[in-house]
Amino acid sequence: MTKLPFRYVDTPERRVLNLAPDGVPCVPVLGFSNYKQTRHGTIEHVHPGILEVSFCQRGSLVFESGGQTYAFLPGNIFVSQPDEWHRLQTNPKGLVMYWLFFHFPSKGHSLLGLPQDESSWLEHALRSFPHRMFHGTDRVRHAFQRLFKLYDTLPPKTAQRRLAVRATVLELLLALIEAGAGDPCLPSREKIEPVIREMRKNPERDYPLDAILSQCALSPSVLTNLFKNTTGLPPHAFLLACRIQRAKELLRDSSQSVSQIAQHLNFSSPQHLAMHFKRETGVTPTAWRKQAR
C-alpha cells in the first residue's frame, strides 16, 4: 500500500477515512473538506499507483497539473492519474469538497471482487479519463454523500456495512466514468478577461505571449483554448481583429492617413495593414473610408 502524505482524521472540517476495513481496500482514502477558515494550498506532490478524484461542491479553487492551471469550480470533477504531479493552490474559507484515493490492484487481482472481465474493464476506464477536469453530476454527488452516511450509520465490521459500502463505491466509480465521458471544463474565463479588455482598449500595444501566460498563470495550450472558447480566436488573431476594428474607427472618424493609422496600430507597413484589412472586410482601407463616410 502506498504511504499516504497525511494522517487519517475525522473532524467537522476535515474527514479522511479508510474504507479498507469495510471490505474496500482499493479506497484507502475517502475525504471530505468543509473549511471554516482559509488554509494554505498543498505543495506539488504525486501518489504512486493512486488515482485521486476530487468533486467540488462549494468554493472556488485552483489546481495545477501537467504544467496547466485549472479553475476548479462548484460542480467540477478533477482527476489526477497515478504518478501525475499536481497541487492545490488554495483551500478557501467555505470550501466543500469530496475526494477519494483509488488504489489499483496488483496484476491478477480483481477490483471489488468483480469477475475478471468486469474488473479489467473498470480499471481500463479509470485509467483512461479523456480529461483532467469535467462536469460532475447528481449521481456522483449522491454516491459520495451516501458513502459517508453508510460510514456514520451502519454498525462497523458487519456484513451489511461491507456490502453496502462496496456497492456504493462501485456506483461512484461508474458515475465518475459516465461523467468523464462528457465535455471537459476549461479554466474560468475570468483569468483572461483583463487581457481581452486591455487588447480592445489599447490594440496598438504589444502583448508578448510570455507576459500573457505569466499574467494569467496558464499554459500556452490552455490559454489558446480559453481564448478560442471566449472570443472565437486565438490570442494573436484576436489582437489583430482588435487592430482592424480600431482601424475602421480611425478611418471613419479621423483625418489620419492610412500610413499614419498603420504606424499607430503597430503594423509593419501600410501594405501590411491593407492586406489584413482587405482580408477582413473585402475592400482596401481607402475604399472602406469612402463607403463609411
Image (tube, rainbow, N blue to C red):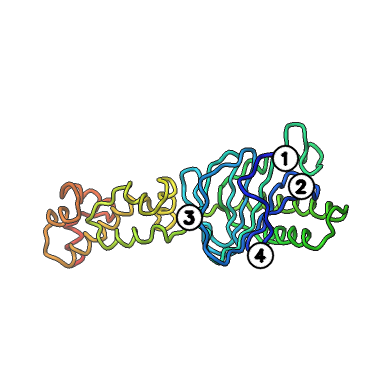
Nearest the viewer among 40 and 180 is 40
Q: Residues within 10 Å of mark 3 (few under 14, many from 20)?
A: many
Please report contact status of discs 2 and 1: CB closer than 8 Å, yes or no.
Answer: no
Left or right: residue 214 compared with residue 3: left
Q: Which residue is at a point 61% across and 45% down the rendered structure image?
A: 5
Q: Which residue is mark 4?
A: 12
Where residue 24 sits: x, y (%)?
Answer: 77, 47
Identify the mark at residue 14; answer none if there is no mark: none
Front tag of 1 and 4? 4
Identify the mark at residue 20; answer none if there is no mark: 2
Please tell me which of labels 3 and 2 falls first in the chain.
2
Q: Which residue is mark 3?
A: 187
Q: Which residue is at a point 57% across and 67% down the rendered structure image?
A: 36
Circle 3 SS class: loop
Please tell me which of labels 1 and 4 falls first in the chain.
4
Front tag of 3 and 4? 4
Circle 2 SS class: helix
